Amino acid sequence: MERERLEQAVPHLLAWYRLFRRDLPWRKDKEPYHVWVSEIMLQQTRVEAVKGYYIRFLEKFPTVSALAAAPEDEVLKAWEGLGYYSRARNLHRAAKAIAAAGAFPETFADVRALPGVGDYTAGAICSIAYDLPCPAVDGNVLRVLTRLLADPGEIGDAATRSRFAEALRAVYPPEAGDFAQALMELGALVCLPNGAPLCGECPWETLCLAHAAGEEERYPVRAEKKARERIPVSVYVLQCGGEFALERRKDKGLLAGLWQFPLVEGRDAPPDRGEVLAQKRAVHIFTHKEWEMTGYLVRVPERDERFVWATAEEIGKRYALPSALKAFFEWVK
Ligand code: SF4
């Protein structure tokens, strides 16, 4: 790999970052707890969607100890709508471990050992909070770097990832936190994933090999994706008096631990009892699967005690529902 080109790229990128970095709520300080919460929220989630959640979450849980002491339902409620709920559960578990240890971990190995923290997140936390030379390499960073170096490595391949992590480690400047964020920022603002990158605004315009060859869109090289699995789902919004039936999902797997209207994955079938008042279809896309849902609003004559029954107001306040079911929550409201 072209170490010299990478070395030259570092000061250009840092200078650009100081001028153009966005003013984001998690860039106000380097408190490890804040950095950690923001990095977990930003996993698979857009910056714009995270901003409000981040601010509200820290108002509600201002310290690791406050988060550790909160009941899990309260943490899931604060996460409601952000998706990938295992992140919230892991954050909560990790907060308990940190509170018990008495301090936030300070080495890559100890941060990496927290539930819900992989190589990328540990690298981001250690470089941003402690200025340690710990590369954080995700799809965005790989896109930017494979273009800079016109590197044909397949970016889904773990070997490509570790090759780039090593190359970055060798050129990390003392301002490790700024450098890590600058790489992410360049990928978010200039070296864009879809459509043409904005090379005319890029600090690497004269250094970038893909740009010099006019082949920006040839990189990154990616293996073909598998099609998402489509699953029919029946959702039953059961109404009895002013209350609605809820059930809790299992502790493991998709949407673990969240509350939902009773539903059946894998088939589309009308309810076998009660009076159907309304029916509608909705689709929700997860990373690897797609729910093709048919929802039924059903008036039932008596409460089935297998479920928890709650009014619309109680559901809004107390029960964290996945956004996949938002279309049907409208009925309840
Ligand atoms: S010059 Fe263009 S392709 Fe190269 S890193 Fe910059 S934005 Fe990306």
Image (tube, helix red, strand yellow):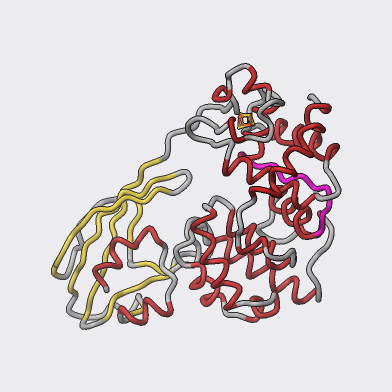
Image quarter for ligand 1 equals: top right
Q: Residue at x 37, y 77 (%)?
A: 315
Quadrant location, the C terminus: bottom left
Task: Residue at the far top: name it.
Answer: 213
Tell me if 172 is positioned left or right of 201 in this view: right
Q: Quadrant of residue 300?
A: bottom left
Please, what is the dominant secondary structure of the magenta stretch? loop
Q: In front: 32, or 321?
A: 32
Residue that appears at 58% across and 24% down: 216
Q: Position of residue 79 (x, y in %)?
A: 51, 67
Q: Is residue 24 visible?
A: yes
- Which is more toward the observer, 255 or 151? 151
Q: Is residue 64 left or right of residue 243?
A: right
Quarter of image, res 245: bottom left
Instruction: Answer whether residue 131 is magenta in the image.
Output: yes
To which quarter of the image does residue 36 belong?
bottom right
Query: How many numbered markers are drawn?
Result: 0
Q: Is residue 266 visible?
A: no
Q: Position of residue 113 (x, y in %)?
A: 76, 58
The picture places residue 87, in percent across and down from the top left corner, at: 58, 60
Above or below — where is 256 with respect to 313?
A: above
Stretch of the chain drawn in magenta: 130-139
Does residue 215 belong to the magenta stretch?
no
Residue 47 drawn above or below residue 152: below
172 above or below 3? Answer: below
